[in-house]
Amino acid sequence: MDKMSKLEELIQQYCPDGVEYKTISELCIPLKKGTLKQTELIEDGEYPVINSGRGVYGFYHSFNNEGNALTLAARGEYAGFINYFDSRFWAGGLCYPYRAKNENEILTKFIYYWLKSKENIIMHSLVAEGSIPALNKSDIDKFEVPLPALPVQREIVRILDEFSLLSAELAAELAARKQQYKYYLNSLLDINQLNSTKIMYVGDLFEIKNGLNKEKTAFGKGTPIVNFTDVFNNRYLTEDMLKGRVTLSKSEIERYKVYKGDVFFTRTSETKEEVGMSSTIIEDIPNCTFSGFVLRAHPLTNLLLPKFCAYYFSTDQVRNNIVRYASFTTRATTSGPKLSRIPVPIIPIHEQQQIVDILDRFDMMTNDISIGIPAEIKARQKQYEYYRDKLLSFMRADK
């Protein structure tokens, strides 16, 4: 019997005429939250702290929630991101934690899988845009979830758990490859090991400038724009990677024009460890501009290859310097003067190219979705999403 046939039998047996839908507020109870400052986090703490990011914010010696709970990120670049935890954790002030009111009516993990299947809708329709994206609890509380019979829920959870386990195994293998890649990245670009005849500083090599700020109505069409998420998620950028568009005057385009070789840094983050993430433009992009949520470092010399910058500014050595100089109040921030203090080794162009060629090969092995483990993960994800969408497609019962 394939994955679908048993489920189809259960659906035919328990809900042939469709299922009832109820809201999150009807099905779930909100769980405890507690604000923790970054300085309160404990490196070897026993319990993960979940806040508004995609992963763990840190660790703490105590917990405020048992397992079998889901969370939705409330604010920031990942507002609307959904997680599930099967063991104790600390829910921070910037997430919404929930659990099913009655597991004999609906499984918390079934609700999680349902919401996860609608994550894009939540992130793009319910999250309010602004200087900091935000998800209102009242909007999530009104979000509807199907309520099939428990045997149907259990079978769906079992199948999706099986897919998740297989994906986790592949992800672990890829993570090991990425650690190897990171080792070579840091070794090849160690400023103390490079045969550099000269050390210069970002302030000597680049002109740093803040990006533009426009009203919301200006976004959605027009010329390409480098946004926060573009820089945060990519070591380097090409034209086809930029999805954001903005309508600007000719003078605005000229003032904020992007050039090949420009290096961008994110200005703020929830944590110090993620502030000042960098990305480099490696090709000419006509009429491209950049957002006020990033800083642009425009090269003043031809001493550095764009791809060399892309790799060098992502090394642990540089990242540690950025974190060291960053300030932190409610959010971590960096600035042009802080970034100007970062040292840069000046080595011959042909040596830079040799390093780039080696790291490009590692990058392809760990990130190219057309080959190796990344390709297998992509295929597995497509299969998972196919089954998830079929499994979670429920006809609404007539009222």
Image (spheres, grey):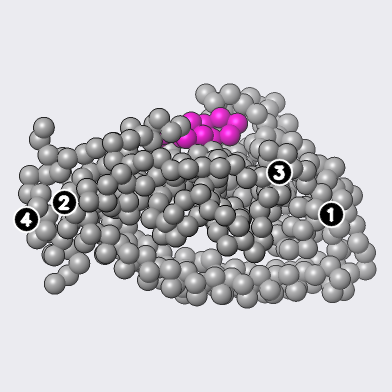
**What secondary structure is marked by label 3?**
strand
Disc 1 residue crowd, few under 14, some 14–19, many 20+, Cα 10 Å:
many
Real-space CA distance between mark 1 and mark 2, rounded to the nearest whole angstrom: 59 Å
Up-down: is 143 above or below 280? Answer: above
Q: CA distance from mark 3 to mark 4?
A: 54 Å
Amino acid identity at mark 3: Ala
Q: Residue at x 51, y 49 (%)?
A: 64
Write down the residue under mark 4. 13
Span highlighted in magenta in the image = 125-135
**Secondary element type, mark 1:** loop
Among the two numbered marks 3 and 4 on one chain, the one whose residue lies closer to the N terminus: 4
Q: Which residue is mark 1?
A: 342
- The kind of residue tagged 2 is Ala
For marks 1 and 2, give the one nearer the viewer. Answer: 2
Asked if the residue at tag 4 contacts the one at tag 2, i.e. Cβ–Cβ closer than 8 Å, the answer is: no
Q: Position of residue 90 (x, y in %)?
A: 53, 51
Can see residue 376? yes
The answer to which of marks 2 and 4 sits earlier in the sequence is 4
Tell whether position 338 is magenta. Answer: no
Counting from the top left corner in percent of width and height, residue 128 is at 48, 31
Give me the disc on residue 149.
Answer: 2
Quadrant assignment, res 216? top right
Q: Which residue is mark 3?
A: 332
Q: Earlier in the sequence, mark 3 or mark 2?
A: 2
Q: Point out the tag, 3 or 1, that comes first from the N-terminus.
A: 3
For residue 294, which quarter of the picture? top right
From mark 4 to mark 1, how far is it between C-alphas? 66 Å
Which numbered disc, 4 or 1, marks the residue closer to the eye?
4
Task: Indicate which disc, 1 or 2, sits on the residue closer to the N terminus.
Answer: 2
Q: Quadrant of the C terminus?
A: top left
**What's the distance in space between the residues labelled 3 and 1, CA to CA?**
18 Å
